[in-house]
Amino acid sequence: TPPTTPPTTPPTTPPGGTCTNPAYVAGQVYNSGNVVSHKGRNWKAGWWTQNEEPGTTGDWGVWKDQGAC
């Protein structure tokens, strides 16, 4: 008889590098507290914003880096 392979258990957490937040969309309005993914990182809006790309506004900008995703 051929050997049997036990079934594999699917992972319970997403693998590293998986961004689960919605992707940043230029031109879309974001409000304070909105979180987006952009270029492999999560970003949280500090206040209302539109057309300000995450990662380009500096330390005092609207987007706060929430870490890699």
Image (tube, grey):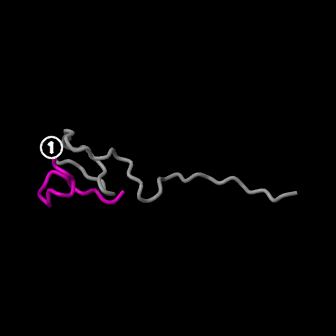
Is 58 covered by the magenta stretch? yes
Residue furthest front as drawn:
26
Q: Pick the quarter of the image with the C terminus.
A: bottom left
Local secondary structure at mark 1: strand
Label 1 belongs to which residue? 49
Q: Is residue 64 left or right of residue 41?
A: left
Q: Which residues are magenta?
A: 48-69
Image coordinates of residue 56 in percent, x first then y, are: 17, 57
Q: Main secondary structure of the magenta part?
A: loop
How many C-alpha atoms fall within 10 Å of the one at disc 1: few (<14), some, or many (≥20)? Answer: some
**Residue 58 point in image, percent of width and height:** 14, 60
- On screen, residue 47 versus residue 67, left or right, reads left
Q: Amino acid at mark 1?
A: Thr
Does 47 appear above or below 11?
Answer: above
The residue lying at 26 percent from left, 44 percent from top is 25
Is 14 positioned to the left or the right of 41 in the image? right
Figure quadrant of the N terminus: bottom right
Measuring from the top left, give residue 8's x and y in whole percent. 65, 54
When asked about the image quadrant of residue 66, the answer is: bottom left
Q: How many numbered circles does the render carry?
A: 1
Residue extending furthest right? 1
Residue 47's x, y, as percent? 15, 45
Residue sitting at 38 percent across and 52 percent down? Answer: 19
